[in-house]
Image: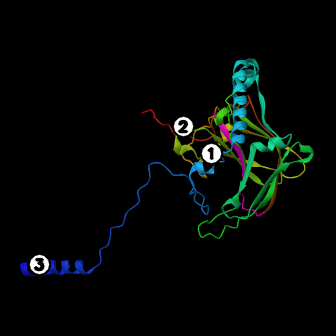
């Protein structure tokens, strides 16, 4: 028995010497901090951030003049009241028009994008409507994915407001804490849209959190006034609805956007008169969805 065990051990050592050395498989560990999200098919950014800056002396002087003008306005508005209005007017306000489209300069506060950025075939455009009194969003939706071997689904168009900035490019937020309802006046072609609201977050991993709700357009020549309570907006993260829901923080709203992705290929259009907020005293609901108790009572 001892001799057979010695022969077996020697044969194993002999085979290990003949076989090539195989490195063990390395199992990737999940990172504690999520990296920057990159859409499938989108090229990687190999440049450093400072390589995209256009250094210009004249542009620098214009920037200094612009930012000091904004800083002066911030100081003067602070002495008048919240957001540059008297405190009584701010407390008694029940309706506020945040965005209205009355000229070419109003379109500079918005940006449009589609799956064309990742190789898709959708197209989206933004222009003023008739008499320069409305915003006209139109284009063509195509759900054909790009041929990059990586993207499986495609077909979206979106319009989003730009992040408001204070002097020296500091973030500025919309304070809607005195209101409870989103008010829009739109005219569509019968397609369903998704309204997305982005608020400021405290943690880095929450930067992709978006509050969404549906906008159903009737179609036809008539305008429709849409009022959506903020309590109806549900939390999503990178397009996925979250189990742990909590209400939208209205004191630090960054942007609002409209997304079309109903997989119905063809032309679309959406005309917007204004986007505002209002105080509906008949609506008393705080949050429409189930919220988990963090410290349940025993």
Quadrant of the image for the N terminus? bottom left
- Tell me if residue 56 can be seen: yes
> Label 2, on which residue?
202
Q: CA distance from mark 2 to mark 1?
A: 14 Å
Indicate which disc, 2 or 3, sits on the residue closer to the N terminus: 3
Disc 3 secondary structure class: helix
Tell me: 31 left or right of 17: right
Question: Could you tell me residue 181's position as x and y percent?
Answer: 72, 35
Q: CA distance from mark 1 to mark 3?
A: 66 Å
Question: Could you tell me residue 100's position as x and y percent?
Answer: 82, 38
Tell me: 289 left or right of 124: left
Query: From this viewpoint, which residue is outermost toward the left?
Result: 2
Question: Could you tell me residue 285's position as x and y percent?
Answer: 66, 34
Quadrant of the image for the C terminus? top left
Tell me: 223 left or right of 51: right
Q: Quadrant of residue 115?
A: bottom right
Residue appearing at x 50%, y 37% in the figure = 293
Q: Which residues are magenta?
A: 252-265
> Label 3, on which residue?
5
Disc 1 secondary structure class: strand
> Label 1, on which residue?
210
């Amino acid at each position: 028995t001892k001799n057979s065990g010695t022969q077996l051990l020697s044969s194993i050592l002999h085979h290990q010497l003949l076989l090539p050395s195989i490195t063990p498989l390395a199992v990737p560990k999940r990172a504690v901090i999520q990296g920057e999200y990159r859409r499938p098919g989108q090229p990687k950014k190999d440049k450093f951030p400072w390589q995209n800056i256009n250094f210009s002396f004249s542009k620098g002087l214009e920037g200094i003049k612009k930012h000091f003008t904004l800083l002066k306005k911030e100081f003067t508005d602070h002495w008048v009241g919240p957001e540059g209005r008297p405190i009584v007017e701010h407390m008694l306000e029940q309706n506020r028009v945040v965005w209205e489209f009355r000229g070419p300069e109003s379109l500079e506060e918005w940006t449009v994008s589609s799956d064309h950025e990742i190789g898709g075939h959708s197209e989206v455009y933004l222009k003023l409507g008739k008499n320069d009194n409305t915003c006209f969003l139109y284009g063509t939706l195509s759900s054909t994915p790009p041929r990059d071997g990586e993207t499986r689904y495609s077909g979206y168009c979106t319009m989003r407001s730009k992040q408001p900035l204070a002097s020296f490019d500091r973030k500025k937020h919309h304070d809607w804490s005195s209101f409870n309802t989103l008010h829009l006046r739109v005219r569509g072609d019968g397609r369903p849209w998704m309204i997305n609201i982005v608020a400021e977050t405290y943690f880095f991993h929450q930067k992709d959190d978006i509050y969404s709700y549906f906008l159903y357009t009737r179609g036809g020549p008539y305008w429709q006034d849409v009022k959506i309570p903020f309590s109806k907006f549900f939390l999503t993260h990178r397009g996925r609805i979250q189990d742990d829901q909590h209400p939208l923080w209205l004191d630090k709203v960054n942007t609002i956007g409209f997304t079309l992705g109903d997989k119905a290929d063809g032309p679309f259009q959406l005309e917007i008169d204004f986007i505002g907020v209002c105080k509906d005293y008949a609506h008393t609901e705080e949050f429409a969805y189930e919220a988990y108790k963090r410290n349940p009572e025993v």
